[in-house]
């Protein structure tokens, strides 16, 4: 029987704001990969100095996106162990307040900045190894006129791709991949 996934549904703009930096998204992703760990463990996973992460870990803890999982003896003092508050985080996108819209916009901008960093690093690394760019990064961008029903179908398809990737995530796999998708209704459509 498959393990049930705990889902955390976020409606509060302040909690959404806790995810508005790529660093916090990286901390949360590292903690998801580890299952649980200390700030030192998270830093090791990310290749960063632990001191650069304490602020972000505290912000995620205050927002309820991660929680304390215990302590570990490390010599002079105990080290706090953290774990994700849920295996899946979903934002309830029905909010309409200005504060909610701004928080959601900040979150999208942050995710796109993180994606840009990942793409640059991948292209740089692969080109240094002689790998063609198309073997490491796939970019698709288009604009189209869609009926609302077709836009809903497109969103479902993107969710299916995300579910497929999550289902086939293999901790023993040799290569990590990032998937970022945005389907946004445009305020004005570029002239043809």
Image (cartoon, rainbow, N blue to C red):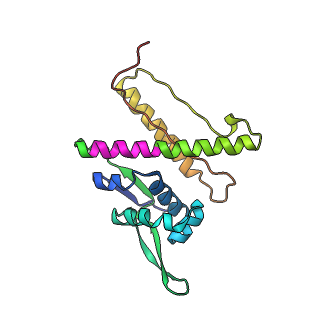
Q: In terms of depth relative to the viewer, which is nearer, 188 or 2?
A: 188
Q: Where is residue 106 drawn, in percent x and y? A: 37, 45
Q: Residue at x 45, y 61 (%)?
A: 4
Stretch of the chain drawn in magenta: 100-111
Q: Where is residue 121 drawn, in percent x and y? A: 62, 46
- Residue at the extreme top of the image, as rendered: 192
Q: In terms of depth relative to the viewer, which is nearer, 29 or 118?
A: 118
Q: Residue at x 43, y 52 (%)?
A: 21
Residue 1 showing in the rendered view: no
Q: Where is residue 138 drawn, in percent x and y? A: 61, 35
Q: Is residue 3 left or right of residue 135?
A: left
Position above or below: 72 against 108 = below
Position above or below: 117 against 190 = below
Q: Is residue 85 left or right of residue 15?
A: right
Decide whether the magenta segment is chiefly helix, strand or loop: helix
Q: Is residue 149 magenta?
A: no
Residue 135 showing in the rendered view: yes
**Quarter of image, res 41:** bottom right
Q: In the rendered view of the protein, which quadrant contains the C terminus?
A: top left
Q: Residue at x 48, y 83 (%)?
A: 78
- Residue at the extreme bottom of the image, as rendered: 76
Q: Residue at x 49, y 60 (%)?
A: 27
Q: Where is residue 177 drawn, in percent x and y? A: 60, 47
**Quarter of image, res 170:** bottom right
Q: Is residue 22 left or right of residue 44?
A: left
Q: How many marks?
A: 0
């Amino acid at each position: 029987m498959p393990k049930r996934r705990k889902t955390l549904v976020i409606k509060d703009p302040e909690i959404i704001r806790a995810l508005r930096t790529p660093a916090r998204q990286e901390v949360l992703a590292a903690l998801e990969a580890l299952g649980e760990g200390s700030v030192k463990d998270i830093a090791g996973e990310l290749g960063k100095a632990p001191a650069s992460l304490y602020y972000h870990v505290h912000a995620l803890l205050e927002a309820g996106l991660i929680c304390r999982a215990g302590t570990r003896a490390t010599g002079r003092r105990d080290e706090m162990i953290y774990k994700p508050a849920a295996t899946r985080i979903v934002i309830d996108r029905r909010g309409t307040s200005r504060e909610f819209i701004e928080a959601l916009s900040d979150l999208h901008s942050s995710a796109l900045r993180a994606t840009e960093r990942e793409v640059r690093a991948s292209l740089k690394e692969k080109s240094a190894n002689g790998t063609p760019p198309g073997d490491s990064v796939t970019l698709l961008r288009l604009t189209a006129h869609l009926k609302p029903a077709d836009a809903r179908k497109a969103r479902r398809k993107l969710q299916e791709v995300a579910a497929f990737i999550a289902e086939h995530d293999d901790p023993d796999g040799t290569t990590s991949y990032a998937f970022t998708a945005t389907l946004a209704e445009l305020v004005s459509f570029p002239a043809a």
